[in-house]
Structures are given as structure tokens and as C-alpha cells.
């Protein structure tokens, strides 16, 4: 659930989603769910001449399992906070 | 993508699982939570679904489930061919009617809403594509580096036979390869 919460803090920010088939979509993060399925608003395809089919789409839903990367603006992320959260998330497992 | 319900505190057998007041079973997040991505908003709208094998299906979303299995009504497969002629790039497309489809969730890559094509398809599309291109250059995400000459991208609907003919003719020309295939890593 850590990254689900993480992405929830990034709703409204511009992100670039790179899929496993090398297609890159940029847009505003509208929402995310527990499977890290992502909904983007104002979506554009990077290199739209190669992928004209998606020209008509304004918003899209991307299945989490096909995402390779989600690129986020560096200024939006508090890496310290993220590290702490990751430690907390994994600590109880060690105890048990 | 395998998902399993989170650990359920109360051990309950199948007879009468008691649902919490929200009506959603334990371990599931309700689809309507604000900020949670859900296909609820796309219900009864015309969407384009991209599949892992590169096919593009267009249809009206009637229902879905937690695995993104979907029922699409009036589905058509949209095949697109990009042809560059001099200064113009023409996008030929054809819709192959398929009917009522149930799409399995794990073959789905992405989906998006397409405008309902009530009016004259040809002219409307040309306008919307030209507008769309302008909007994109104006949005400034890439800092104006996309000040492409406003190539009027035309979308023309053709029949399947015509599309196949065009594909043959244009094999010789250097048309960009549209690689949508996902499962290439499975190919020897």
C-alpha cells in the first residue's frame, strides 16, 4: 500500500508513464488505485506521429501491470519521507 | 497481475459474509473513493481499448470488474495506417464491426474515451485533430519545444479492402513501424 499512498500524494501533478511496449504517455495524474492502475488527464503521447491512434484521447486509464516506469517531477517528492515510510512498512515483518 | 484480498481479521466461512456498512467486502477499496482510479466514470461511454497484441477496440463500456474484465457493446476493431504524402500525413482508419465483446482484463493495456461519432465523421475528425494538435502545442508541457508546424493531420475512414490495398502500396515507402506488440519478450 506504500506506493498507492505515495501516488495519491501526487494526484494533480504532471507525470510521464512509460509502458512496457515503450510507449510514453504524459499527462496529469487524476487518480490511482491499489493495483497502481493510473488515470491520466490531458494525455498526450510522446512521439505522437508514431502512434496516431491515441491522438483523439484526452484522458485514459492505464492498467498497472503494463507500466514500466512512472516519471515524476523531482521537486514533488520528499525522498526522506519516502525512505522513512519504506522502513516503517518493512520493520514489523522483521520483528515477526 | 495476481491480487489477493488483504488478511481478513474475522475468519468467516462462505455462508453469510457480513459486509461492512459501506457494502464493499473486506479487503476491497470501494470504486467510488475520490482519488481512486476506477472505470465507473467510463460506464456507458464509448472507449478505445488497446490490447497487448496491439489491437485497438472501440466500443461502449457496459460493465467491468476488479480484474478489468470488460463488456463492450457495439465493438469495432480500429485499424490505422499512417501515410506520409509530401507535406501531409494522412491517417487512414477502418472499423471492423464485431458486436458484443467480453475483454479479459489481463490483455488490456490502456483505454481512453473517444468522442461519440454522431455527426459527419470525416470533417469533424479533421477539425478535432487540428484543434487537438494546437492544444497540445499550447499546453507547454514540453516547454514549447513542440512547436511543430501545424501539420493538419487528417483522419479518413476507409473500408477494410481499401486499407489493405493502401498497406500493400505503402510497404515500399518508409512508413514508420507502429509497434504495439507487448509480448515480444516471449518470442524466440
Image (cartoon, rainbow, N blue to C red):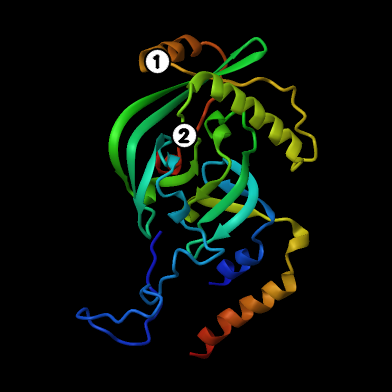
Judging depth in this view, the residue of B173 and B164 nearest the camera is B164
Would you name the residue on which mark 2 appears?
A: B116
The x and y percentages for residue A87 are 63, 80
The x and y percentages for residue B113 are 49, 41
The residue that appears at 57% across and 40% down in the rendered structure is A23
The crowding category of the residue bearing disc 2, from other C-alpha atoms within 10 Å (few below 14, some 14 to 19, many at least 20), is few
The residue that appears at 62% across and 32% down in the rendered structure is A48
Residue A32 visible within the image: yes
Work out which residue is located at the far bottom of the displayed protein and give it.
A95
Above or below, B129 against B42 in this view is above
Q: Chain of mark 1?
A: B
The number of numbered discs placed on residues in the rendered structure image is 2
Q: Chain of mark 2?
A: B
Would you name the residue on which mark 1 appears?
A: B164
The x and y percentages for residue B187 are 40, 39
Q: Dividing the image into 4 quarters, which one contains the C terminus of chain B?
A: top left
Depth check, mark 1 against mark 2: the one in front is 2
The x and y percentages for residue A55 are 58, 32
Above or below, A29 against A93 in this view is above
Local SS, label 2:
loop
Above or below, B164 against B186 in this view is above
* Side (left or right) of B135 relative to A40: right
Mark 1 to mark 2 CA distance (whole Å): 26 Å
Residue B176 visible within the image: no
Q: Which numbered disc covers residue A49?
A: none
Above or below, B90 against B8 in this view is above
* Side (left or right) of B25 relative to B112: left
Nearer-N-terminus badge (1/2): 2
* Side (left or right) of A73 relative to B187: right
The residue that appears at 41% across and 35% down in the rendered structure is B58
Q: Dividing the image into 4 quarters, which one contains the N terminus of chain B?
A: bottom left
* Side (left or right) of B90 relative to B21: right
Amino acid at each position: 500500500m506504500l506506493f498507492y499512498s505515495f501516488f495519491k500524494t501526487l494526484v494533480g501533478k504532471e507525470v510521464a508513464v512509460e509502458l512496457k511496449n515503450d510507449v510514453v504517455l504524459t499527462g496529469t495524474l487524476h487518480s490511482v488505485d491499489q493495483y497502481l492502475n493510473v488515470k491520466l488527464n490531458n494525455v498526450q503521447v510522446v512521439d505522437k506521429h508514431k502512434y496516431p491512434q491515441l491522438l483523439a484521447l484526452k484522458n485514459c486509464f492505464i492498467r498497472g501491470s503494463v507500466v514500466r516506469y512512472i516519471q515524476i517531477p523531482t521537486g514533488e517528492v520528499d525522498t526522506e519521507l519516502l525512505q522513512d515510510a519504506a522502513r516503517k512498512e518493512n520493520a514489523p515483518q522483521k520483528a515477526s | 497481475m495476481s491480487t489477493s484480498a488483504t488478511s481478513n481479521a474475522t475468519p468467516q466461512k462462505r455462508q453469510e459474509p457480513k459486509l461492512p456498512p459501506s457494502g464493499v467486502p473486506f479487503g476491497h477499496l470501494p470504486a467510488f473513493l475520490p482519488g481512486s482510479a476506477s472505470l465507473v466514470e467510463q460506464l456507458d461511454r464509448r472507449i478505445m481499448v488497446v490490447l497487448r497484441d496491439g489491437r485497438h477496440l472501440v466500443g461502449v463500456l457496459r460493465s467491468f470488474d476488479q480484474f478489468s474484465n470488460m463488456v463492450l457493446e457495439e465493438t469495432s476493431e480500429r485499424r490505422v495506417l499512417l501515410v506520409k504524402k509530401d507535406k501531409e500525413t494522412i491517417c487512414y482508419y477502418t472499423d471492423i464491426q464485431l458486436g458484443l465483446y467480453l475483454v479479459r482484463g489481463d490483455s488490456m493495456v490502456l483505454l481512453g474515451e473517444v468522442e461519440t461519432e454522431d455527426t459527419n465523421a470525416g470533417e469533424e475528425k479533421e477539425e478535432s485533430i487540428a484543434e487537438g494538435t494546437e492544444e497540445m502545442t499550447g499546453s507547454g508541457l514540453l516547454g514549447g519545444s513542440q512547436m511543430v508546424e501545424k501539420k493538419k493531420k487528417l483522419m479518413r475512414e476507409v473500408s477494410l479492402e481499401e486499407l489493405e490495398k493502401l498497406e500493400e502500396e505503402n510497404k515500399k515507402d518508409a512508413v514508420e513501424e507502429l509497434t504495439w506488440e507487448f509480448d515480444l519478450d516471449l518470442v524466440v
